Image (spheres, helix red, strand yellow):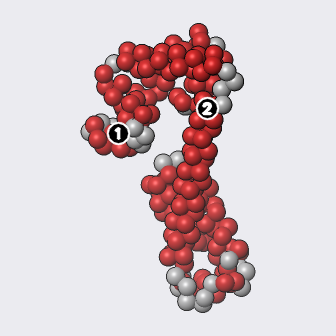
Amino acid sequence: MDEDKRVKRLISGDKAVINELYADYSSRLYHFAFGYLKSGADSLDIVQEVFVNLWNSRKNLKKNSNLEAYLFTVAKNTIISVFRKRLSEKNYLENLKFEVVDNSIDTESKVNYDLLAEKVQELIEKLPPQRRRIYVMCKEKGYTNQLVASELNISLKTVEDHMTKARKFLKENLSEYGFIALLYVALFLS
């Protein structure tokens, strides 16, 4: 169907055209979003948001609007918003980590924290060499799993498997340290 006719139908409030557009573009939009977000649920949310935005903004469309360009521009902008939100949440958690450490109730808590951090370092040293290298790249250097896979020339699944096993090993070996260890695990190893 001619895109100009679709735009006119959309502007006039024809709900059937949204279903047509969804059938034509939802899969491509999903894969576009997934390429950036690596999350099926987030990608589905992006697709839904794109079509809600299209419907809500339909009266602002020009009669010769390029719907495909519009849909992918909205998707791109929504993905950028998701990244900004993730970065904001990550920064908040980073600040929270430092507040927990800096605002410790007393010297004993700080000493306990230092001992725990030392124990974690000892446990990291006990990881198999490849697992330790992957863990350090992800957790201490801040590399993404994808970047680690690329740098080490291994699959993303292998990186994820090593990270899962490293976290499990650390959690199991820190459980004897009680509440402060649980807090440490929640803040630093998740």
Q: In the rendering, at what x and y percent does residue 73 appear?
A: 52, 71
Can residue 123 be seen here?
yes
For this view, does 169 lie left or right of residue 95? left
Say which residue appears at 46% left-offset and 55% top-offset: 36
Q: Is residue 179 above or below residue 4?
A: above
Which residue, given by chain and number where applicable, does mark 1 sit on?
Answer: 148
Q: Disc 1 residue type?
A: Val
Residue 139 quadrant: top left
25 vs 137, nearest the viewer: 137
What distance separates the C-alpha of mark 1 from that of mark 2?
A: 31 Å
Please tell me which of labels 1 and 2 falls first in the chain. 2
148 vs 39, nearest the viewer: 148
Disc 2 crowd rating (10 Å Cα; few below 14, some 14-19, many 20+) is: few
For this view, does 34 lie left or right of residue 49? left
Secondary structure beneath label 1: helix
Task: Assign the C terminus to one quadrant of the image.
Answer: top right
Residue 149 quadrant: top left
Say which residue appears at 60% left-offset and 82% top-offset: 6
Say which residue appears at 36% left-offset and 24% top-offset: 132
Task: Assign the N terminus to one quadrant of the image.
Answer: bottom right
Q: Which mark is residue 102?
A: 2
Say which residue appears at 43% left-offset and 20% top-offset: 121
Q: Is residue 88 above or below residue 57?
A: above
Q: In the rendering, at what x and y percent does residue 170 appear?
A: 49, 19
Secondary structure beneath label 2: helix
Can residue 26 be seen here?
no
List the single residue furthest toward the top: 176
* Tag nearer the camera, 1 or 2: 2
